[in-house]
């Protein structure tokens, strides 16, 4: 059984959960980045005027959410950040490209692939193209026939083992989401993906523990 990459979904949106996910061994910690009035905010919540954010009935004061510089400071040069670019603000990607350090590897993903051109000349930035719909997957398959990329991320309901194999011809890693339960984790392994993205820590922890168990078993047999 191959080792799965474990990506902690949205764990980077809060500085405390960021540190916890890194300390517990996540391979990547995802954070959502929005541009708003000159700020690059780390949040999944939607804008509700200049002072408030909301999601599923929850109200949050905008001043409570961290900005990108605070996230980078909290990560302290750890290369396991994955920044998911949200929205269609034309200055989001260029502003982020200006802020990101040149010395640390960082992963950037988005469903709006045109944004990734801002990082084209950044050797330390790994680009991941996301697809969450059948139309998006069709476009992704077509694009990978012409141009390879570091990674792709596709909603689990859209994948088959055959599609995963095809995607891997144009991408080094194939990721999927959501993987928030033991059944979803088993399905991801059946599909043959390289990594899983989940909000539920138990599923991610199960993947890590299974992989560690496999590694220890292999090490024991090699003695």
Image: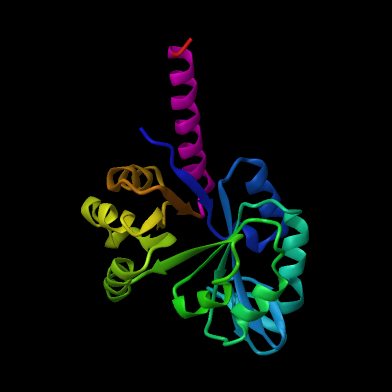
Q: Position of residue 52 (x, y in %)?
A: 68, 82
Q: Is residue 193 above or below residue 209?
A: below
* Total residue callouts: 0
Q: Position of residue 138 (x, y in %)?
A: 26, 72
**Left or right of 135, for residue 24:** right
Q: Quadrant of the N terminus?
A: top left
Question: Which residue is farthest top?
Answer: 223
Q: Is residue 90 above or below residue 136?
A: below
Q: Position of residue 51 (x, y in %)?
A: 72, 85
The answer to whether residue 165 is magenta is: no
Question: Which residue is farthest left?
Answer: 162
Pick the residue in front: 24 or 113. Answer: 113
Q: Residue at x 44, y 42 (%)?
A: 4
Q: Can residue 14 be seen?
A: yes
Q: Residue at x 37, y 69 (%)?
A: 131
**Left or right of 135, for residue 103:** right
Q: Residue at x 76, y 57 (%)?
A: 74
| Magenta stretch prevailing secondary structure | helix
Q: Is residue 157 above or below residue 25?
A: below
The answer to whether residue 217 is magenta is: yes
The figure's colour scheme reads rainbow
Q: Position of residue 91 (x, y in %)?
A: 62, 85
Pick the residue in front: 121 or 160. Answer: 121
Q: Can residue 66 be seen?
A: no
- Please report the bounds of the magenta region as a residue range: 199-221
Pick the residue in front: 124 or 114. Answer: 124
Pick the residue in front: 109 or 51. Answer: 109
């Amino acid at each position: 059984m191959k080792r799965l990459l474990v990506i902690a979904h949205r764990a980077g949106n809060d500085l405390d959960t960021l540190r916890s996910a890194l300390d517990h061994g996540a391979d990547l910690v995802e954070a959502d980045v929005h541009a708003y009035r000159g700020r690059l905010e780390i949040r999944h919540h939607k804008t509700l005027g200049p002072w408030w954010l909301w999601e599923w009935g929850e109200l949050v004061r905008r001043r409570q959410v961290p900005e990108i510089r605070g996230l980078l400071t909290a990560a302290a040069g750890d290369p396991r950040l994955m920044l998911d670019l949200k929205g269609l603000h034309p200055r989001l990607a260029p502003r982020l490209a200006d802020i990101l350090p040149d010395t640390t590897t960082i992963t950037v993903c988005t469903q709006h692939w045109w944004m990734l051109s801002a990082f084209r000349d950044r050797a330390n930035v790994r680009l991941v193209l996301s697809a969450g719909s059948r139309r998006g997957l069709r476009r992704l398959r077509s694009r990978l026939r012409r141009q390879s990329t570091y990674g792709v991320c596709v909603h689990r309901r859209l994948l088959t083992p055959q599609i995963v194999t095809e995607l891997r011809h144009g991408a080094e890693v194939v990721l999927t989401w959501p993987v928030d339960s033991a059944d979803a984790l088993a399905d991801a392994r059946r599909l043959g993906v390289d990594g899983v993205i989940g909000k539920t820590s138990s599923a991610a922890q199960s993947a890590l523990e299974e992989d560690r168990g496999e590694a220890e078993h292999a090490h024991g047999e090699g003695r």
